[in-house]
Amino acid sequence: MDDEEKLLFNGSVETRRNGKLSSYLTCGFVLFWVVLFFAVVIPLMYRLPTALTIEDAHENVFIAERAYKNLYNLSNIGIKLTGTEKNEVEAVNFIQNELSKIKEDLQDDLFDLEIDLQHSSGSFITGSLLRIYQGVQNIVVKLSPENSTSETYLLVNSHFDSMSGPGAGDAGFMIVTMLEVIRVIATSRQPIDHPIVFLFNGAEEVGLLASHAFITQHKWAPFCKAVINLDAAGSGGRDVLFQTGPNHPWLVDYYKRYIKHPFATTMAEEIFQAGIIPSDTDFRQFRTYGNIPGLDMAQCFNGFVYHTKYDTIDVIPRESLQNTGDNILSLVQGLANATELHDTEAHKTGHAVYFDFLGIFFFYYSETNGILLNVGVAGATFILIFFSMWRMASVSQVSICYIIRLFIILQVMQVISFVLSIYFPIVVANKMDSHGQSLTYYSSPYLIIGLYVTPSLIGQILPQLISYLCVKCHNKISKPYCAQLKLHSHSINLAVLTIFLTCLGFRSSYIFVIPLIFYNIALALNLMTALHDRGYAWIGLLKISQIIPFLYISYLVYTIIVVLTPMYGRSGSASNWDFNIAVLAALGTVVSCGFLVPLLSTSRQRSLVILTLVATTALFIILACYTRLGFPYRPKTNAQRIDYLEVRNMFYEYDGTVSRDESGYLILYEDRRREKPLLDTKMNLTGLVSLESNCKKHMMCGMPLHDNRCVAQEFQCSWLPRSEPIEPPGPTKLEMLSKTIINATTVHFEFKLTGPTSMRLFIQAYNDVTISDWSFLRTYLDKPPPAHIPRQINFKYANDDSPFNFFIDISKLNGNFNVPLFQLGVSGHYMAHDGDSESIKFASSFPSYSMLNHWPALYQRYIF
């Protein structure tokens, strides 16, 4: 190859002499991609439309100002716990009043507006728990075309109850969006074909109760054929589509046609359904009990305020309401005229692959087409690479076998590079976790760059530099050809990975297809124009071709990290969640930079590149471990979440005597660092112990474990005893009304339970005893939880707190009923109370960066 051809790339003397990229060009090359990320990806990630004011109002337009005023009034009610006056009376009255105003302005020649207040009781099984609810409330609105006889409805749902805070984001934001959407449709002249049911449900936070009540009991539920579910895992920002269908890709088509500000990805759906995200939505109830397909959408940014007292209107920009309002209004209007609603089963044709590009464009196709696309692109990759290697052999006057042997060596090095690029970040994550330094990026997310991105780059570059020094491919072929072979080996990795994940059924494999498509285009153009054989001239097209993949992959990975980071502050202490962030950052680095990193091995300063990356990683580890930057928590913005109960435990033996009466704090740590950040504060944690020994001796650890997280992570909980007994704010009372022997082997117990709005029963029979019948769901009796977990029954009162009567039938073969038969634990949770003066003093001793969720609880263990 002559010098004139080499000059086509950069014209430098150094390139002509050494066949290497100049160090200046290398710096510029790296800077270009960094600037591209911060100049394009970040601004578009947080871009929001201009908020419209009432002065801008005209027909059929969502007005953010009006919604914002409604949100101000709704969030000012305060914490809307199910069963409290704020939720059951004040919030209900507010929503009903706003609906009445809308009804006054209704275009009654076009529409009918019906408002129904539902009160329901029921039960269902979730996991190893039976939930029973009494008197939960739904405000159900049906907006219909005048004189409509249609029996196909569109359902739109969100919830107005809240946990731990005013719930401005979760989900007051969506409630006022629904109110404004109803107003716009009801007061405009734009017709709809199908009635729309708007469900304002009052008991989502306590186990998806109200949505279950609607879908299983409401008179309009059987006619609902599709649902738009609206929720939140954050506050402010954009709304993400993270679940669809299932098996109804036409819904995604409507999303594409009608959404104004798209934000969606199949990857989010697969992550959510894999259980990695510690949340659930009403979408599950509609899908499970109503077999209704739909779209599940949520606010997802700033999850640090989710379920905290800081979930207020102050952190929500009006532009965010405009963004969501524009989307929901347009989508509701589109689906309310969808012909597919007449027979949704006829359009049940499989899953969809979908994603947005920087919030500008939205793409979707069926899973079948996705498989064809993935296989086709992977096949084209193999073919183009073969032609490329054939050209190299022809131009270099070597055999194709030589090129193939060289390629195999480089392919092995590329596989090693791929493995190390994932392994190094995992090592960093695990080592830091083992030294108690997890979640260092929690309040300083840019630390992820040095902790996980640069180690991934080291893993990518190191084997390639070794191959550059050890594999003397330039003895027979040129260095530009050698560089191309390295890029080809990376594309083969992506192609194989694409086929493998496609075979496993992962629709997210499209992520690997995007850079492959553009690489194939660049390679094909280089082959057709002979740039392929003219030194480094092919790099220009390669660089241009990778701009779009880089933008998309970095945008996607950044989005998921932004969403997951606050979630991992409330995912429990049992697992090292940094592992997930490390893998995600590494995969994003490999896919977005995989075609760019090999070019750095041609730099004159290749050793300096590695040293710079190593130094950067070391610097960030020091910053994370030894400076304030790595301390995860900040007051208000990045709080340490701690749940605890102010517990009074009382154990009643078979003869009625009290064998145990203790008080203390049952603490559940919501993140990996547990109590360690508290040890150097003014808190007095003397006597703090693990529950592990208790769990081995007593049913449910002898504690009022209050949700599935506590049960799943019982060994992660701690107990801090206190000397002064806790006096619960009210009674929790279990009365045995009767004990009747039915026959020689069965005895019948009847009980009455009274207490606060939230109670829980634990039932465990002794070894020679079985529970043959009871008044609860028979399916839960026939399919009990795992042997080490007792039957758990959660009671929730809303606006009906009348006593709960139930019976249990116990069978024993020898008929001896004058001995202990079963244990029955009763816990009452006073979730609307702060506790006594000692408890308030204890709460005040936590550091300012702690976000507490606590209440008094009484646990009584009986033996019958």
Image (tube, rainbow, N blue to C red):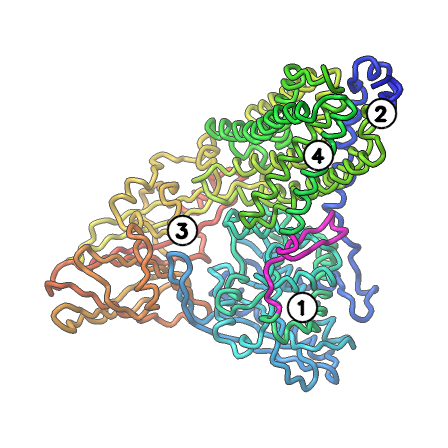
Above or below residue 336? Residue 637 is above
Vertical position of residue 805 compared to residue 838: above or below = below
Q: Is residue 617 visible?
A: yes
**Residue drawn at (50%, 43%), measured in percent from left and top?**
641
Say which of marks 3 and 1 sits in front. 1
Residue type (three-letter) at the residue carrying disc 1: Leu
Q: Which residue is mark 4?
A: 385
Is residue 94 visible to us here?
Answer: no
Residue assigned mark 3? 836
Q: Mark 3–mark 1 contact, CB under 8 Å? A: no
Q: Specify start and end residues of the magenta stretch as a single range.
A: 347-370
Residue 92 position, x and y percent, is: 57, 70
Mark 1 Cα-neighbour bin, 10 Å: few <14, some 14–19, many ≥20: some
Tag 1 secondary structure: helix
Q: Are marks 2 and 3 in contact (CB under 8 Å)?
A: no
Name the amino acid, label 4. Ile
Q: For mark 2, what is the residue?
A: 9
Q: Residue at x 87, y 24 (%)?
A: 8
Q: Label 3: how many residues lie within 10 Å, few (<14), some (14-19) or many (20+)?
A: some
Q: Amino acid at mark 3?
A: Asp
Which residue is at 41% across, 68% downward?
A: 123
Alpha carbons under labels 1 and 2: distance apart: 60 Å
Name the front one of labels 2 and 4: 4
Task: Please say if the residues under marks 4 and 3 sit with CB atoms less than 8 Å apart.
Answer: no
Residues at marks 4 and 1, CA–CA distance in whole angstroms: 57 Å
Q: Earlier in the sequence, mark 4 or mark 1?
A: 1
Residue beneath label 1, please? 179
Nearest the camera: 334 or 635? 334
Quadrant, the C terminus? bottom left
Q: Nearer the viewer, mark 2 or mark 3?
A: 2
